[in-house]
Image (spheres, helix red, strand yellow):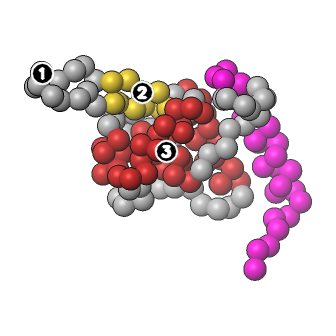
Amino acid sequence: MFALPEPGVKRHVESKLTEVATSLTIVSMGNKARDEMPHLAKTEATILDILLGEGSREMYGLEIVNGSNGRITRGSVYVVLSRMGDKGLVESRPEPAPTQVGGLPRVLYKASGLGLRAYRAWVAAKDAWGLGVPEGAR
């Protein structure tokens, strides 16, 4: 059965999220109001966790799948990355065209500034609610 947190805990979380939400107004988020915090799905948080990992480097979709230890599938990674791009959580760019005839350029992805702030807010909210923070959360 689900137990509601004590009232003081909820006020603390709302206060923390309000503080964080004000820093999320820099990038357009589609239909969201400028002061509205973006929703971060678990798969999106997983992708941001991987992208923000050691070195915080650009990665290909399949590198993200390989770094997820089975949490993200090849069939879902590009759909989720596209949605995250629409929300402004990730930035992408094609790599330089391959020298081989017929090869298509791959797309590199990295967390945007908004993605970093949204991920940090998600981690802070999980921590404040006692829901556990991902190991090595950035």
CB atoms at circles 2 and 1 under 8 Å apart?
no
User: Residue tagged by mark 1?
Assistant: 99
Q: Nearer the viewer, mark 2 or mark 1?
A: 1
User: Residue tagged by mark 2?
Assistant: 92
Q: Amino acid at mark 1?
A: Thr
Q: Looking at this rendering, what residue extends furthest in the left direction?
A: 100
Q: Earlier in the sequence, mark 3 or mark 2?
A: 3
User: Residue tagged by mark 3?
Assistant: 80
Q: Looking at this rendering, what residue extends furthest in the front direction?
A: 102
Please determine whether, in this image, residue 103 is positioned above or below residue 68: above
Residue 82 in sight here:
yes
CA distance for labels 3 and 2: 13 Å
CA distance for labels 3 and 1: 29 Å
- Residue count near mark 1 (Cα–Cα under 10 Å), binned few <14, some 14–19, many ≥20: few
Quadrant hosting residue 3: bottom right
Q: Earlier in the sequence, mark 2 or mark 1?
A: 2
Q: Which residues are magenta?
A: 1-28
Q: Amino acid at mark 3?
A: Val
Q: Earlier in the sequence, mark 3 or mark 1?
A: 3
137 left or right of 9 in image:
left
User: What secondary structure is marked by label 2?
Assistant: strand
52 left or right of 30 in image:
left
Nearer the observer, 70 or 135:
70
Nearer the observer, 76 or 127:
76
Residue at the image point whose x is 65% and y is 54% from the top:
127
The image position of residue 109, as x and y in percent, is: 40, 32
60 left or right of 27 in image:
left
